[in-house]
Image (cartoon, rainbow, N blue to C red):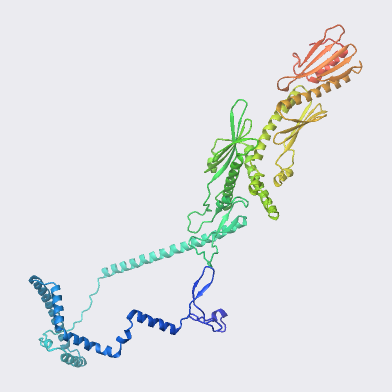
Amino acid sequence: MDSEPSWKQLRLSLERPYKDDNGNTIPIVEDITPDGQYIYETKENPSARLGANLRRIFAERGLDFFDKVTADSLGSEPSQTESSKLEDPSKEGQEEGDDDDESKIMTYEDLRAMRDEIMGNLAVSLGEMTHAQQVLAALLSTPSNESQTQSSQSSSQAQAQVMPQSQSAFPSPSVKFSSTQVSKPAPIVSVQGFNAQLTIGRKDEALRHAAGLFKESAESMERTRVAGEKYWVDALKIRRSNWGLVPAPLPPGSATGKGADKTSKDFLISYGLEESPTQFRRRAIGRLPSYTAISHDVIFPYRKKSRLRVSIVTKDQTGITHTTTNNVPFDEESILDGALRSAQREIVEQEIFSILVQEAGSLPTASAKVSERFIVVDAAQGLELHIELADSVDASTEASRPVERNEMCDLIYHGLHLLLLRRHALLKEDRLSSSSSPPPATPNPEKQLQSNYPILQPIIDLLQYQVFLNTIRTEVTQMAHALQAAGIPTNLTMNIVGETGKELVKLLDGKPSLTVGGEIMVRIFDRHTIRFTFVSPSTLVAHLSQSTLTVTSVPQLCQLLMDEVEQCILSRIRDLGKSLSENVEGVWFIDLDHCVGRWEGCVLNFRVTYGESYSINCTAFLLGCPPGRPGQAHFYPPKDYQGVKFLDWVDYLVKAAVNQPSIRT
């Protein structure tokens, strides 16, 4: 006993305790009120209890109960009843007569049937009694040994004394019993072998059946053990991959009252984003399959397998429609982490689409058409953005779709995810900062904060920025190609996004507006520069040598380009003319859109014009060389000398005018 632990040495009484440790009586609790107050059983007073019982006796038995029930009355009751019966014989006869009248009168046929039935039963009883008498007499008259004879005689004498005279009148039986030993015949060998085979076969079948039951039970236990190990190994893998684990709700019918065990016995996998709305976080729930489940994949009770598709529809100059879409990414769902990533991507895309539906109706720079599963945004001229939440999308069906893929659609698809994460981070930051400050006076501050961080408007700005850049690139590239075709040294530099990678990341981390910018530089003759800067979605600024202008339309951009290139060309002609006419002391100057060179007896005037796609055309008018000869007009490009560079043509005209040779026009 000394070696046993203390908890084993504890002995508890089986009877209900009625006193506490201090010896006070423990009251019996009858009820507990809703506010937690105990109601105890009241102690009964023996005298009060006796009084209550006496009152019940008088109320139920009458006030003269004790007068009736006395010792004399109890002893005299039978005599009184007998005397009353003797005194009133006529009353009893009258009552019996009434009973007979009331009973049914039997007919002769009924009496005959009853007599036959009774006589048959009596005859059977007589036969059975006679047979028993004879058997008993025969057994008593057969001596087995002396002791048995003596005992049987003594018992028979005692029975004879007890038996009535009517039974002793039966005659003694003439039957004598004798014993014979009978041995069982030897069994037939073939039959005995067949019986042994049947017995062994039945036992073998029973053993096989029992062995099969044990085998199935062992296999079931092994499967259960393996499934249990896999269950917790998968749980550790999920936790190691930083997926959220939350307690599972109690099963239906569990006790939830005061003092009940509310500890969860299982867990659920929460794969939704932390700052997502409640309606999406409730659907982002999964659980591992139990050992009784057929499938071993993660179970997603609310999964819809809907994916987000982003398409861009454009029209070219001929009116042909081109549709491009994004590549929908898929994960390998045969592995645990891949299935969770795929389910998380689906619920995130559902949240993105719900936010896009809310924002599509209030776009400041575009119009949109919204349906339950489809959004069409007229983002720019000749460009539409289609966003669809498609159901039952898998890798095989998506790969078989005959649609052209585009990098811009992929950029928009992944950009929506980044903008959603940015929105969540900024909303969380605002919520944490507002918890320490007094509440705002606005009626719905959370909705106002959500409207400050849109995710659709930056995408529209990006598409408009792309169309804007394509327009600028087309105009500037045509001008550069026209200059290069004329042999004018031209260098075009275009930087669409001027921000570095770190600056772009900071745009997603901070609260400033999501705008990007760049610049275009056109360098002519390796000395003149035309520079434009632009900011998304459609702001263009021209940085000129004398001023800075904001370009608001495409015609304004075209006119600005032509004017600046014309001034560059005229400046180059002036410089070239000065260098070639130094010996004749020529004077060169620019008069608006003309470059004029003068020297003694001669005037040379150059004017630059533009043809189709900004092709360079120039008209040179020579006057007074040689004297008395009418003015001569020369055109670039010359008809008979295709491929002549513009500066060579200017050089040839100036030299000819200075030296006064004959000029072929």
Classify 222 as above or below 87. Answer: above
Q: Residue at x 33, y 86 (%)?
A: 66
Percent position of residue 216, x then y: 43, 62
216 vs 623, left or right, is left
* Near-viewer residue (167 or 516): 516
Whether residue 488 is visible: no
In percent of width and height, residue 73 lies at 27, 88
Counting every numbered tag in the picture gives 0
- Residue 521 placement, left or right of 199: right
Vertical placement of 43 versus 146: above or below? above
Q: Quadrant of residue 235?
A: bottom right
Q: Residue at x 71, y 22 (%)?
A: 613
In the rendered image of this protein, does residue 664 appear above or below residue 16?
above
Image coords of residue 294 (percent x, y): 47, 55
In depth, the one of 65 and 173 nearer the eye is: 65
Q: Quadrant of residue 135?
A: bottom left
**Quarter assignment of residue 328:** top right
Figure quadrant of the C terminus: top right
In the picture as drawn, the residue positioned furthest to the top comes out as 628
- The answer to whether 467 appears left or right of 293 in the picture is right
Quarter of the picture holding the N terminus: bottom right
Give the x, y percent position of residue 420. Answer: 64, 46
- When the figure is inspected, residue 287 is found, relative to residue 45, above or below; the finding is above
